[in-house]
Image: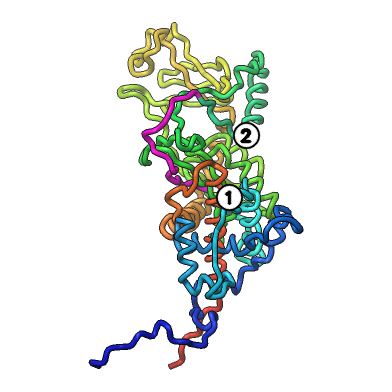
Amino acid sequence: MLKRAGPEQTALEIVTLDQLVPVDHLLRKIDGVIDFSFIHDLTAPLYCADNGRPPLDPTLMFKALFIGYLFGVRSERQLVREIEVNVAYRWFLRLKLTDASTLSQNRRRRYQDETIAQAIFDRIVEQAIGAGLVDGTVLYTDSTHLKANANKGKYDLAMVAKSRADYWGELDRAIDAERALHGQKALKEQERQPAVKETKVSRTDPEAGYMVREGKPKGFFYLDHRTVDGGFGIITDTFATPANVHDSIVYLDRLDRQVERFGFDVTAAGLDAGYATPGIAKGLEDRNIHGVVGYRNPTRPKPGKMRKGAFVHEPDLDGYRCPQGQLLTYATTDRGGYRHYRSDPTICRNCPLLASCTSNAKAERTITRHVWQDVRERVDANRLTAWGKAIYRRRKETVERSFADAKQLFGHRYARFRGRTRVACQCLIAAAAQNMKKIAISLWPKPKPSLA
C-alpha cells in the first residue's frame, strides 16, 4: 500500500476501440439502429468527383455535429477537442486513436441553406416511421424561443411590414364575398397590404426578431416552431422564424408539408391558446382535422365598461342584441376579416347604460365578429369533449416535453449562429439528434430481468 504507483501512461496495451466503448453507451445504441448511409447520397451533388483536395467525409462531419447536440457541446472548437480524447466519440465516427478530426470552413461555405439539414431530418423521421414509432394521426405543435446571438441594447428603429398568415389569400376571398353580399365594393389592392409598424432591428443579427410577450423575456430571439407526433413523441417538423412572427402565421403551411412529405392521415391536432384564431380553425376544418385548442381569455374592457359578452349574437337577423334590447346592425367588413355591427346613436343617447357601454363621441357602440367566427366556435367546442380533454392533456407529455429535453440536454436555449438560415439548420440538426436518441432508446433491446 505504501509503494508509489509507477507511471503507466506509456505502457503498451493491445485493445480495440470497440472493447473500450460500454455495451449500453448511447452512441452504440444509435449506431445499431440508425442508418446514416443516406447522408453520402444527399451531399454528393455538392462535391466535385475529380477536382480539388479530398474533402472531409460529409457523413463523418454530420455525425460529429450530432455528437455535439447529443451531449450538449455548444462550441465546434470544443467539440473537436472532445473528439480527440473521447474514445466513444471516435468509435462512433470510425476514427482511429491516431486520426485527426476537424470541422473545417468547408461546412460553412458549402452548406449555404437548410436544404441538406432538412433532408437529413426528413430521412430520420422516415426511419422512425419505418420502425413503427410514428403514425401521424395526432400531431401537437408549439413554439419555443431561442435567444439570438445579439445584444438587445444595440438596435435601430425601422418600419417593417407585419407578417401575413398563410391563409390570408383565402381570407381575402371571404372578405370580398362578405362585402358583395351586403352590396359593398371590394377592397382596393393597397388596402389589402399588410400593416406596417415601427420595430427594433438588431445591428448584430438583423434577421432576429424583437420579442415582447407576456411572461417572456424581452430582447432579440428566434422561434422554433415544432410539431411532435402523439405516439412516441417523435419530432415530425421544425421551422425557425424571427421571434416577432406569431405562432399561427406558418402553422398551416408546415402542417401541409408534413402531410405531403410523409403521407400522414392527420385526424386531430393539439395546440395551445396561441393558435386560437379563426384562420387556424378554418384551415383545420377544411382539412377535416379536429382541432383541440387551448382557451384564450377575451380582451378585457376598460374598467367600468361593458364586456362584449353582454351582447347576444342573433345570426338570423345578422346582428347583436344589446342588454337594453337594441339590435346592432351590420355596417361593413374590414381588411382583417371582421364584420362591424353598430348601434343607433339616436337610441343610445337616451340609454341608461350609455356610460358603461361606450365612450364614443357619437354615442355609438361597435361590436366586431370575424367572418370565420362560427368555425372558431365549433373548434373551441372540441376542447370541452371527453376525447378533446384527453388529447389536450397529452400536450405536456409530447411537444412540451420535447422542448424541455431540447433546452435541458441539447443546448436549445440559445441560437448558436446568426441569421435565420443558420438557426434553422441548428433547429433541424438538434431535432434530428433528439429523434435519434428516442429511436435508439425505443428500439434497443431491453435487458432481461435476472432470475436470481
Q: Residue at x 47, y 14 (%)?
A: 343
At x 44%, y 29%, the residue is 200
Q: Residue 274 got which mark?
A: none
Residue tagged 1: 108
17 left or right, relative to 49: left
Instruction: Estimate the spatial distance between the alpha carbons at disc 2 and disc 1, rounded to whole Å.
Output: 35 Å
- In the image, what residue type sits under mark 2? Tyr
Q: Nearer the viewer, residue 282 or 131?
A: 131
Q: Position of residue 124 (x, y in %)?
A: 62, 61
Instruction: Pinpoint residue 8: horizontal percent, then vertical percent.
Output: 38, 85
Provide the residue designation for mark 2: 167
- Position of 182 relative to 167 (above/below): above
Q: How many marks?
A: 2
Q: Is residue 231 above or below residue 440?
A: above
Would residue 148 be counted in the magenta stretch? yes
x and y, in percent, of residue 429 in the image: 56, 55
Give the residue drawn at x 44%, y 16%.
365
Which residue sits at x=38%, y=36%? 152
Question: Residue type at mark 1?
Answer: Arg
Tag nearer the camera, 2 or 1: 1
Task: Give the residues drawn in magenta, as a range.
Answer: 141-159
Residue sitting at the far left: 2
The correct choice, above or below, for 292 with respect to 310 in the image is below
Q: Quadrant of the N terminus?
A: bottom left
Mark 2–mark 1 CB contact (< 8 Å): no
Q: Main secondary structure of the magenta part?
A: strand
Q: Secondary structure at mark 1?
A: helix
